[in-house]
Every structure is written in C-alpha cells, then in structure tokens.
Amino acid sequence: MTITSNITESKELFWFNNTLVAIHVSSSKGSDGICVVEHHMPYWDSPPLHVHHREDEVFHILEGRMRFHIDGRERIAVTGETVVAPKGLAHTFRVGSSGGARCLTITRGSDFETLLRQMGRPAGRPELPPQSAPTPEIIEALTRCCSENGIDIIGTPLV
C-alpha cells in the first residue's frame, strides 16, 4: 500500500519543462497500470497540441483554472472539476489562474509516465523550476520521446 498526502511526501519529484511533477502512483505498482501524477504548473503554461494513442488522460483540478481544448472544443475547468481527454483525440490546455494551477493527471498505462521520467530531470526542491522557453533541441527531443511513447505532437500550445 502507498499513501501520499502532498507533493513533498512523494519520493519521485521531477521538473518537466516548466512544471513540477510528482509521481504518486506508478503504473508499475498495480496490475491495472494506473498512474497518478500531480502537476504544479505556472500561469500561462500550455503543452503543444498532442494525441495519446493508447491512454485516456484524466485531469482532476486541485487548484486553479485551466482552459482545455479537446477535439476542437473548448472547456474551462476550475478547482474540483475533472476533465477527460480520450485517447485518440487531440488536446491541450492553458493555465489561466495567475497563481498557477495544480492537477492530478491519471492514466492507465505507462506511456505518459515513461515520457515524464525520460524528459524530466530530478527536482532540486519541491517547487517550480526556473522558467525558460524550450530550445529547438528540447522541442526535437520532446517530439521524438513523445512519439516513442505513443504520443504525437501535432500542433502548438494554446495562445
């Protein structure tokens, strides 16, 4: 049994791009392959438009406001709400709250978790990393790593 109550108790903290990620439940811990990741994201953070081919992606908003774009439709989600991005549908989001946002991201499978482990770097402390724009090399590496993990980047972040 694994019990964690907050991000500082997680043993696996990563800086993934400009976010802080805590893997609370690894897909390898149970027979169903459920993965639970907590994300802390700064204001205006947005991943590129992408498609997961083997995993639904469930977002449960713990704090803040996020604007989701899923399969051409927009939805605003706030603290306490849950959004599902079904596998096979293009999606992205933008953090809209000035203080950033926190959410749980839940998947069934190891694709997203593997991507986080491969592209993330150990977090030096349980807070957001220094903010920086991605370099062309980082974008190329992220695109390649996504593809290797059943995720295709097909567009740009939300504006």
Image: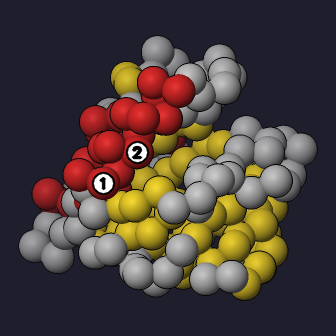
Q: Which residue is most to the right?
A: 98
Chosen colour scheme: secondary structure
- Does the residue at mark 1 contact the one at mark 2 (Cβ under 8 Å)? yes
Q: Residues within 10 Å of mark 2 (few under 14, many from 20)?
A: some
Query: Which residue was labeled with disc 2?
Result: 143
Residue at the extreme left of the image, as rendered: 31
Depth check: 73 or 12 in front? 73
Residue linked to disc 1: 147
Q: Is residue 127 visible?
A: no
Percent across and percent down for residue 62 are 66, 61
Apparent side of residue 70 relative to residue 52 in the rendered image (left or right): right
Q: Residue at x 45, y 69 (%)?
A: 51
Q: Position of residue 35 (x, y in %)?
A: 31, 62
Residue for point 66% across, 26% down: 133
Q: Quadrant of residue 26?
A: bottom left
Q: Position of residue 107 (x, y in %)?
A: 36, 69
x and y percentages locating residue 69 in the rendered image? 69, 73
Q: Residues within 10 Å of mark 1 (few under 14, many from 20)?
A: some
Front one among 29 and 117: 117
Amino acid residing under circle 2: Thr
Q: CA distance from mark 1 to mark 2?
A: 6 Å
Which picture quadrant has residue 53?
A: bottom left
State whether residue 115 is above or below residue 152: above
**What amino acid type should be assigned to the residue bearing mark 1?**
Ser
Instruction: In the rendered view, tell whether residue 112 sits above or below residue 129.
Output: below
Tell me: residue 142, above or below residue 15. below
Residue 98 visible in the snapshot: yes
- Regarding mark 2 in the picture, which secondary structure is present there? helix
Q: Which mark is residue 73?
A: none
Q: Quadrant of the N terminus?
A: bottom left
